[in-house]
Image (cartoon, coloured by chain):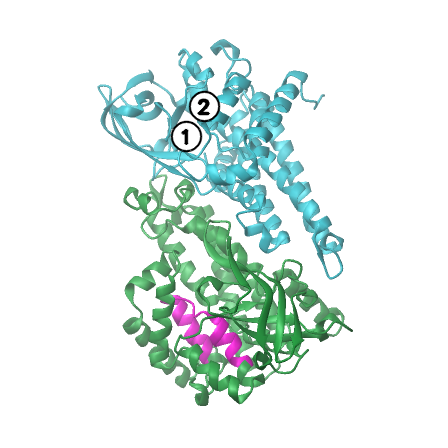
Chain colours: A cyan, B green
Amino acid sequence: MNFETSDDRRMLADSLARYLADACPIAARAELAYAAPWHSEAAWSGLTELGVFYALACEEAGGMGGTGFDISIVFEQLGRALCPEPVLPMLLGLRLLAAAGRDVAPVLDGQPVAVGIGELDAPYDLDGIETRAQAGRLTGRKSLVYGGAGAARLLIAAWSEGKLALFEVKAEDAQVTGYGMIDGGPAAEVFLDDTPGTLVLADARGALEDALDAGALALCAEALGAMEIVQGLLVDYLKTRKQFGQPIGAFQALQHRAIDLGIEIEQARSIVILAAAAEGGPEFAKRAAQAKFLVGQIARQVSEEAIQMHGGIGITWDYPLAHFAKRLVMIDAQLGDTDWHLERLMTALTQR
Amino acid sequence: MDLNFSPEEQAFQAEVRAFLSEALPTEIADRVGRGEGPTREDMERWHGILNDRGWLAGTWPKAHGGQDWGPIHLHIFEEECAKFNAPRIVPFGTKMLGPVLQKFGTPAQQAEYLPRILDGRDWWCQGYSEPGAGSDLASLKTRADPDGDVYVVNGQKTWTTLGQYANRIFCLVRTGFDGKPQEGISFLLIDLDTPGIEMRPIRLIEGGYEVNEVFFTDVRVPVANLVGEENMGWTIAKYLLGHERTNIAGTGFSVQALAQVKALARQVKRGGKALIENPLFAARVARVEAELEAVKITNLRMLSKAASGGELGAEPSMLKIKGTEIRQELNDLARRALGPAAAPFPSEDLDNLAIAPQGHGHNASGYFNNRKISIYGGSNEIQRNILGKLAFRGG
């Protein structure tokens, strides 16, 4: 048994942390993540140069990682920095393209890819997808396409000949309307109306499920990083904010609540480790669902409690907590919320 | 035991409903219902409509332009207003300063200020909290030093709600420096046009502006603007807190929010079915509905006690805690029901994309903004301190 992070990954985490502290300070983030293009082109280049996308792709595809722990180490750092760069769709795109045996070299070198799977009436459920392809032309609407505002290449899940298939669509051929998110960062609505697309995978269900599980793991790791920063902010605040002649952290009622958050964050770390270890194996779907379910619950509790214990300052734009709290709450709505993943786990119980 | 309003109260309820369906402008109710909040003009217009009907400050004595409403009539009025998506009456003049002046003000202060609250010439805001005095309000440091027939005010207030629209502020200021901190506080009325005052907006978590910091530098305030006697401010502040309490559970807002969540969950589709058919989501709605039904009765029990002249103890604090928790849970469900469609930053450009169903584009903003309700007006932690004191230290 060994819970140590390998030296290679430790070095990646450290260099990523150093880079993001410099390139993505929270005060600048509070401006740029909420105004078009909702992220920083310079930070995107920086992440590319650091080899972040290589770390997210497996060696067979030309990458240098792609395992569960590579994913978790990168996204934990992105979460700690509250980085609004659309790295998540790159992870999904790399996995999907690699599953199809496509050349991912341009993507490894930072060419933005976005992935359109969810739709308005089926944000999480592959069976609910309504977008269809016929003779290489796609019709439908993809909603909340993360990173879709700036990506020239779109990977689109659509029904074709009775199977869920994956197509590549050029953004210039579709109608793409970009917008910013309440927690910062770019997304888009993608409208397809008899839009030409190239078939990537004729039967993409397995690859899509794997990519979504990897995405769920990534979001959990991002939340974990963000929660640890929030816990640090909270404990510092409780130690320094004085009311009634003493630091408010001297009050046992608040100590207990802050400690409860610490316990929950350790639970989050453990379930992220478990899910990361399961990547590539038969239990990955279950572990990813368990992680996304637990982290969704914990992230809401951490956000709400940290705000409450800060008081008014916690809901001001100029204090970092507000932005971490927004991200932590909204992460739940990405790639399946708490209830959605709990239902997956419930369904699996009855199928045994 | 009879859980119903009296025939007279039911008649009043019907009268309020009839008035609201007639007099509340649709566009204002729509804006409130969508969570875009009322605009300044909406609030001023609605105040004017209510004042014409004599209902802007219904609890005030008739002699001052009110209706002498007791707590049950006020409750009925506020519940119905919430259900109709009427803008909340800005409370600083009508519910806070008005009662203070009626109890502690001089006849001259009453004659000068009360009519101006009703007709909208004055928009009051509140200067209580300071950066170093939040939950521990009595430690406030903004000072007022006498200099002939004026006080010279120096210091900083914060969390001043809607101060950007106000022309006057009532403040707690320090005039005494010996003894317990509560004993050296005075209640002062200040014209915001006086030189030396600067109002700076504070941007909140969801991006909106509704609270402010107020800086006072050598601000000269006539001694005649003191309410009550010098160093009596804490007594006044405590009296005033009692007047914030009847609507403290906000059950009208919750009733309205629950109806909206149910309608939304019937409209939103998941897996080919309406979201309300999803057992996990339905369980969330059913749970909070049971909680809400219980707190509505707790609220009525308090009102009934208050209306029959009973002394309130723990009730307002309990209602503040439970009522805000329920409202926040409903805000969570309104956001949760949308899934990722709650995520776009609200903007008019998005309206024709119809990502969230119409009227729900602000659900996430509302959730984040309403974290404030368990913090302001005495945080839920302070309410628990009050309850703890009552239970374990005999008040």
Q: Which mark is residue B372?
A: none
Which residue is tagged 2? A90
| Disc 2 secondary structure class | helix
On the rendered structure, is A18 left or right of A1? left
Discs 1 and 2 lie in a common subunit = yes
| Disc 1 secondary structure class | loop
Which residue is tagged 1? A147
Residue at image x 33%, y 75%? Answer: B49
- The chain containing the residue under callout 1 comes to A
The chief SS type of the magenta part is helix
Q: Quadrant of residue B152?
A: bottom right
Toward the viewer: A111 or B181?
B181
Toward the viewer: B221 or A350?
B221
Residue B244 picture location, percent across and down = 54, 72
Amino acid type at mark 2: Met
Mark 1 packing: few (<14 Cα in 10 Å), some, or many (20+)?
Answer: many
Task: Spot the residue most to the front.
Answer: B148
Tally the numbered discs: 2
Disc 1 or 2, which lies upstream in sequence?
Answer: 2
Q: Above or below — where is B83 with respect to B232?
A: above
Q: Above or below — where is A303 with respect to A46?
A: below
Residue at image x 65%, y 82%? Answer: B229
Q: From where the camera sits, is residue B85 visible?
A: no
Amino acid type at mark 1: Gly
Residue B266 picture location, percent across and down = 35, 51
Q: Quadrant of residue A189?
A: top left
The answer to whether mark 1 and mark 2 are in CB contact below 8 A is: yes
Residue B393 picture location, percent across and down = 76, 71
Q: CA distance from mark 1 to mark 2?
A: 9 Å
Toward the viewer: A343 or B170?
B170
Per the rendered image, the range of residues in magenta is B73-100
